[in-house]
Image: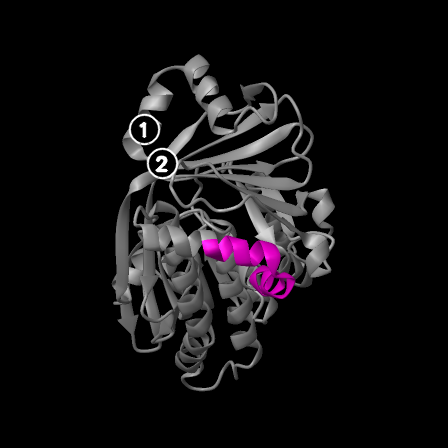
Amino acid sequence: MTEIQRAQAVVVGGGLTGIAAAVAAAKAGLSTVHLAPKGPVDRRTSALMMPAVRYLQEAGLIAEPADVGHPLKQIRIIDATNRLLRAPETLFDSVEAGLPAFGWNFPNVKLTDAFGQASAQLPNLVTREVTLTGLAPGADGHLLMLSDGTQLIAELLVGADGKKSLVREEGDFRARENGFTQAALVCDLELGRPIGNCSVEFHYPQGPFTLVPAGGNRANLVWIDDRAVLDGARAAGNEALIETFLKKSMRLFGSIALATPTHVFPLSTLTVTEAGKNGIVLVGEAAHAFPPIGAQGLNLGLRDVADLAASLAGADVGANGWALRLSDDYAARRAPDLARTTGIVDALFRSLLAEMLPAQALRAGGLWALKSMPGLRRQAFGMGMGNR
């Protein structure tokens, strides 16, 4: 008979949020197992706002941001639509918020390396390259069936296993999901002229065309449009694709060359009604997923982990039912932030796509207000960065 191993905490999911959650659990003193199957190298980047960057430093996941990423000091928004009511061009500068930068743009490969180094320093954290295949409630915890045929019992279970989370499904969490006809095309570009420390967003009727500075003349592109448009642009070949990029960027940065292959992925939203219950907590895309608008993805996931760490700090680990109480506490901590962020991102994305004149007027008027009212602009800075 196979021996069943035990752990106070098991974290499922090998992405950045999963590693951060495993480190948080281990740093709280729990015997922790991290189930992190090997996946493809993540060539994307993540724009993290300063609250998330500060958490990474406080948690020991990175040292100096400059060693890993590139600062984001300005955000420039250009209304590139031909709508009757157009928004003004708007520039947001971190100096106005009293900050050296709004955040940092990090290559996910470098973040993964840094997080991995932090996890390797924790003797009570064991990483296993296996997948979760099944989950059942047990008398003294959660019984996990693994792909190598072994089993684990976890008192606290952390689901960080993405949009198609098995932990969420088997844990009977209710989720709302909504798909869009739009998709996102991402790649790295080499520009003829650098964009410095300024993220530039060209807002088109079907979504933004965004260039995020990545150091030197390199920029990360996130282009949101109808899936058929993006697939057609890729199918036309690299020469035609470059011409499309030049037009979309209004030729503001000189020549453009592909620095990495392009990838297209569908867009959808996903939110759970509660982020924790019955000794299970959900973090990252297991709990929420949004279109890449407003730089909320990994930022929100790291706020999940920060609240998990806070719940762990206040838990009486070892007392009967500690994991049940912790999951309830975590759910209560996360509820306001998840509700607010879901509303903001959904409203922002839909406003970009709105064709109705009242919606266009509201959006244009909002940007005029942000452009002309410093107090309102500072308040928007705080909301966009995830200050609580």
- Under mark 2, the amino acid is Asp
Quarter that holds the N terminus: bottom left
Instruction: Tell me the tag on residue 229.
Output: 1
- Under mark 1, the amino acid is Val
The magenta segment is: 365-382
Q: Residue furthest bottom?
A: 320
Q: Is residue 230 above or below residue 328?
A: above
Quarter that holds the C terminus: bottom right
Q: Look at the image and say whether residue 372 sits in the magenta stretch.
A: yes
Mark 1 is surrounded, within 10 Å at the Cα level, by few (under 14), some (14 to 19) or many (20 or more) other residues, namely some
Q: Is residue 288 visible?
A: yes
Q: Look at the image and say whether residue 157 sits in the magenta stretch.
A: no
- CA gap, disc 1 and disc 2: 7 Å
Taking the spot 63% from the left edge, 66% from the top edge, the residue there is: 375
Give percent across and percent down for residue 374: 64, 61
Cβ atoms under marks 1 and 2 closer than 8 Å: yes
> Image quarter for residue 134?
bottom left
Residue for badge 2: 225
- In the picture provided, is 110 more to the left or to the right than 225? right
